[in-house]
Image (cartoon, grey):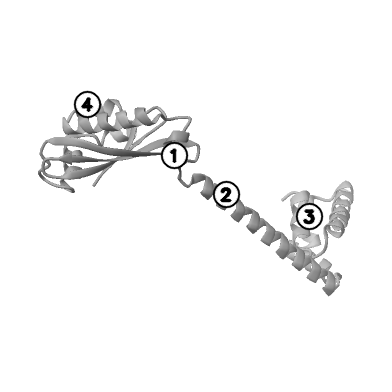
């Protein structure tokens, strides 16, 4: 341990205000440097001066109880302020990360007609089981999920026999912002011969398929 670390460790355990701590640190450093100039080794000086705890307790014995109480109150206050600042930062970060929805018409990134067209195209590819085309229009994380086995399982949660597609219902869309990412999220109900299925489809800013949910 060098002289600075030794003196700073002592100062941290002394229960007084910053001004007095500064004076104590200056005094300790002066004593150490004077003894080193006289030829003593730092290890020998530290050994003779005593442990960090012993020296700090020696100084604390000469500090009034009132001053020690003031120091304790300030220390608690600093800790509370630090916690409040951290909590405020975490709350702000959590709010920033939470998804926020806006009307698609207000979006600077998405066009309502374009999103609706993409939704219908995605469903047409699904109905035709053209997974190669779907994968080409999806983000990399989605591509491995767009296969017949996975999609058959998803469709099976609704019905085992859908029949042919009859018509598209009305499409509902919104822009969702999460962090600094923008997504278009749309829902549309499609009527088939034997079932009606509602699709929730998500697209990123490049209109790549980023999420699919069927119910």
Examine the rendered structure and indicate whether residue 153 appears above or below residue 68: above
Q: Where residue 161 appears, x then y in whole percent?
A: 10, 43
Choose mark 1 or mark 3, whichever is in front.
1
Are circles 1 and 4 on residues that touch, CB within 8 Å?
no
Where does label 1 land, which residue? 103
Choose mark 1 or mark 4, whichever is in front.
1
Q: Earlier in the sequence, mark 2 or mark 4?
A: 2
Marks 1/3: CA–CA distance: 62 Å
Q: Where residue 36 appears, x then y in whole percent?
A: 85, 49
Examine the rendered structure and indicate whether residue 212 appears above or below residue 122: below
Q: Earlier in the sequence, mark 1 or mark 2?
A: 2
Are circles 4 and 3 on residues that touch, CB within 8 Å?
no
Where does label 2 land, which residue? 92
Q: Secondary structure beneath disc 3? A: helix
Mark 3 nearby-residue class (10 Å; few <14, some 14–19, many ≥20):
many
Examine the rendered structure and indicate whether residue 192 appears above or below residue 73: above
Say whether residue 173 is visible. yes
Say whether residue 54 is visible. no
Marks 3/2: CA–CA distance: 39 Å
Where does label 3 land, which residue? 7
Check residue 63 in the rendering and tell me which mark sits there, or answer none. none
Q: Nearer the viewer, residue 133 or 3?
A: 133
Q: Nearer the viewer, residue 116 or 24?
A: 116
Q: Earlier in the sequence, mark 4 or mark 3?
A: 3
Choose mark 1 or mark 2, whichever is in front.
1
């Amino acid at each position: 341990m060098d002289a600075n670390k030794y003196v700073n460790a002592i100062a941290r355990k002394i229960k007084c205000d910053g001004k007095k701590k500064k004076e104590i640190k200056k005094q300790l450093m002066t004593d150490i440097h004077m003894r080193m100039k006289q030829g003593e080794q730092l290890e020998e000086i530290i050994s003779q001066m005593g442990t960090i705890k012993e020296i700090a307790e020696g100084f604390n014995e000469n500090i009034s109880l009132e001053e020690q109480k003031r120091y304790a109150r300030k220390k608690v206050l600093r800790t509370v302020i630090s916690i409040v600042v951290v909590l405020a930062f975490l709350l702000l970060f959590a709010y920033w990360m939470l998804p926020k929805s806006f009307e698609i018409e207000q979006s600077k990134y998405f066009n309502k007609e374009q999103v609706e067209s993409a939704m219908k195209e995605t469903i047409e590819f699904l109905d035709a089981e053209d997974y190669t085309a779907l994968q080409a229009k999806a983000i990399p994380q989605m591509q491995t999920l767009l296969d017949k086995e996975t999609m058959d399982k998803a469709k099976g949660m609704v019905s085992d026999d859908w029949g042919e597609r009859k018509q598209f219902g009305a499409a509902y869309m919104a822009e969702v912002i999460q962090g600094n990412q923008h997504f278009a999220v749309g829902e549309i109900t499609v009527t088939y011969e034997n079932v009606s299925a509602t699709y929730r489809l998500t697209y990123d800013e490049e209109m790549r398929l980023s999420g699919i949910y069927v119910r």
